[in-house]
Amino acid sequence: MTIQTPNGFTLDNSGKRVVVDPVTRIEGHMRVEVNLDQDNVIRNAVSTGTMWRGIEVILRGRDPRDAWAFTERICGVCTGTHALTSVRAVEDALAIKIPENANTIRNIMQLTLQAHDHLVHFYHLHALDWVDVVSALKADPKATSALAQSISPWPLSSPGYFKDVQGRLGRFVESGQLGPFKNGYWGSPAYKLPPEANLMAVAHYLEALDFQKEIVKIHTIYGGKNPHPNWLVGGVPCAINVDGTGAVGAVNMERLNYVSSIVDQTNDFIDQVYLPDLMAIASFYKDWLFGGGLSSKCVMSYGDIPEHANDYSEKSLKLPRGAIVNGDLSQVLPVDLRNPEEIQEFVVHSWYKYPDETKGLHPWDGVTEPNFALGPNTKGTRTNIESIDESAKYSWIKAPRWKGNAMEVGPLARWVIGYAQGKPEFKEPVQKVLTDLGLPVTALFSTLGRTAARALEAQWAAGQMRYFQDKLIATIKAGDSSTANTEKWKPETWPAEAKGVGFTEAPRGALGHWIRIKDTKIENYQCIVPTTWNGSPRDPNGNIGAFEASLMNTPMADPNQPLEIIRTLHSFDPCLACSTHVMSPDGQEMTKVQVR
Amino acid sequence: MAAVETFYDVIRRQGITRRSFTKFCSLTAASLGLGAGGPATLAHAFETKPRVPVIWMHGLECTCCSESFIRSAHPLVKDVILSMISLDYDDTIMAAAGFQADAILKETREKHAGQYILAVEGNPPLAEDGMFCIDGGRPFVEKLKEMASGAQAVVAWGSCASWGCVQAAKPNPTHAVPIDKVILDKPIIKVPGCPPIAEVMTGVVSYILTFGQLPELDRQGRPKMFYSQRIHDKCYRRPHFDAGQFVETWDDEGARKGYCLYKMGCKGPTTYNACSTVRWNNGVSFPIQSGHGCIGCSEDGFWDQGSFYDRLTTINHFGIERNADIVGGTAAAIVAGAVAIHAGVTAIRATVKKPEKTDA
């Protein structure tokens, strides 16, 4: 059967159905099913969020000052971004103003997350979609060295170094115990890199694994640990004491120097390893420009990284804010998270129940009741699904829409919006990548474009880490060491009822938390997270979400090896634990099964 | 013979001499009562045995345990994965997906029955026939039980697998349960924390591989080597607690001098973990050192013990049968419960864990 979607895709589910479950190298659990035509081109795509935890129902009745810790546990990969969004939502509701230093330290922590998360995503979640590990064994270490030295001044680039890495990889492969590389798609024609580039990438896979643990020490210094550093409504928990009595018990000169040193190393690694690798890999995949999906049509960003404390206006935000619809890059539209007509969630294809499922609900008024039910065309059983029926409910993810449009969010969305706004800090790096690769602007709207935007953003974030660390020191130097505002710390200072919204740009895209507080407790809490946008199922009008759209019309080299599917899905960096949220207004118990 | 990198190769590469290795084998053999040929047998095994297969499964979770694991500085996680264990299945990092990934589970059950270690991050929800966590079209709990049946031992990573953690906090809408509620016939090592410390995770793994046995566990199933003392017992701010010097509000003079965070709700006095000794991210800091109280994330049910900012009551000053309010010179809001010397707190943890209901 062929369906024309309102957002411009032709779906045909008559061909061979291919199921990928579990989709690995993501956070959480997801499934995807596609239909192929006789040429093995994807003509229908169905993405299913396959987990649900109910964090928001758990938040009801709790102390709003604790919400950051609960919501932080929504995701341990993008650790901290939910916590930041949460404290902003509570501060918005209670009109709490934070000190300048708190804003600066929060920015440094959020940027640290961006840099770390993008780096780990590229090397450890995404690289194996582009890099053939086994092919690296055939590389000439001298040629690899020559390649590495031609693209970067990074010192670990001698023939001996690459020979050593190759030797270790060789012993590993010969052992017959391939560990995480077991059953990979090695040798697939979908891999395009020559052996020496593969060897360079494998070496950097291991180096990045060693290095990523350094970046997060910034969270440890300001937040006490990583993953899951500590936050505070009204500021940050770490006090500053540069040279007074007891300074060793606070953020002092040694701690500031420690952060500065990590910031420098992070900039070096991204400039000299991540970006050159991205460009080297991209140069071999220039012809593989599938996966654009919604990116050329509808993208959205809330903006983040406020220059000034308590100023969340577009002017203050260093990551761009706005929406583009229908591919009209000449107009970046304003986005209002408080307007009940703008952001709405639908559940007609999600495992939830609304009184009227033709209508969407704004998150402040969000209603959700779980309703796990499979459609009549499902193959298999309720607890052993062979093939899902997308004409009915088919995902634990809701379908959020902005003014009725399915939107893509994430690094590519942010960079497209920044580019469309003509901001040089976004436009120039994009232009340089395109020029260096000899590609037109339209090439940006692809799997490769998504991956490239993420790398550019990591580089931007590392630069901003330096900027804000310098700003912190300058503010302290000017005599301001304040890190928390405790005027409204005590609940008796709060109004009887309040509502607020907090937002960030998480590594994976626009993130919002909506809170209602009543009698000092949480009355209602709703999160709409990046993967809810990107991984959404269809809406009542039939618009498909970003994941599904991105898979459309992609040819597969071998239907038994879903390399192209996971490559494109990974370019979004899916986070399923984030996306599958729910709030049950009545908090009623659901059916339980016996412990078997 | 294939160039298998054995346990022996690994420890040699990490700087352990042949002589030390031989000595280690002799001592271990003696302690195991292996007799005259024992050391040679043991040495041969270490020199030739392949890496232990590890299957790392994910239920309802946030992946913070995996993220913590890759932060390990000693040993480096690349050495753990390349040389110490054979991490044959881990959805978060494995190359394969879909049926190629599922095939590894089947192969492991068949080829390595009774030999592999099952590591579990997250937990199974039981409501809705288990379909709040679907893996390969089926309830995660079913796959978990299948893999547990052939494992030699099970490691419960983090507070989700150990206790239930955030999704099991009241009212636990998915009926998420710790794994020992569904895996009943295997030894389970609980490594709680949200997440656990990286070096604690790799420490537990390398202990098992190095000593060929499971670590000694406490009554709750936690390795004693990392979980037998409270954060408070080894906290570097403890002298301020003993001296009655407390942070009274965020960013006050006390906060800037690194005073004790007890009055800000710190759960260090009732939390068993290695944060104040091993510390985090290669020893850089830990929550208290960075100015926020411990939230007790390695304790069972820590989400449901009141606000993280509620003060624990009746934690008594060391050696003095007075609590911190009295020592600190501030009027106590409530002085409740049993009066016990500090060292006796362990035995009555259940009573002292109840926080004040009033705001601290």
Image (cartoon, coloured by chain):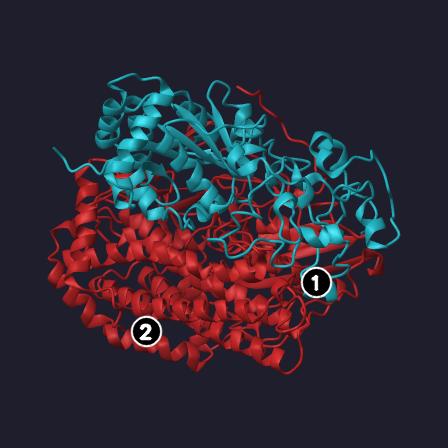
According to the colouring, which chain is red? A
User: Which of the two discs, 1 and 2, sits closer to the camera?
Assistant: 1
User: Which quadrant holds residue B306?
Assistant: top right
Residues at marks 1 and 2 touching, judged by CB atoms closer than 8 Å = no
Describe residue A45's horizontal placement relative to residue A543 as left or right.
left
Give the class, few, some or many, for how many residues have Cα within 10 Å of label 1's Cα (few <14, many ≥20). Answer: many
Q: In the image shown, does A480 or A431 lie closer to the viewer?
A: A480
According to the colouring, which chain is cyan? B
Q: Position of residue A33 (x, y in %)?
A: 37, 41
- Is residue A17 visible in the rendered structure shown here? no
Which amino acid, by three-letter code, is at mark 2? Val
Q: Position of residue A35 (x, y in %)?
A: 32, 43
User: Which quadrant holds residue B160?
Assistant: top right
Describe residue A563's horizontal placement relative to residue B301 as left or right.
left
Which amino acid, by three-letter code, is at mark 1? Ala
The chain letter under disc 2 is A
Describe residue A39's horizontal placement relative to residue A32 as left or right.
left
Say above or below: A409 vs A183: below
Q: In the image shown, does B154 or A360 lie closer to the viewer?
A: B154
Q: SS at mark 2?
A: helix
Residue labelled with disc 1: B255
Residue located at (21% from left, 42% from top): A172
Q: SS at mark 1?
A: helix
Q: In the image shown, does B291 or A447 lie closer to the viewer?
A: B291
Describe residue B359's horizontal placement relative to residue A445 as left or right.
right
Residue labelled with disc 2: A441
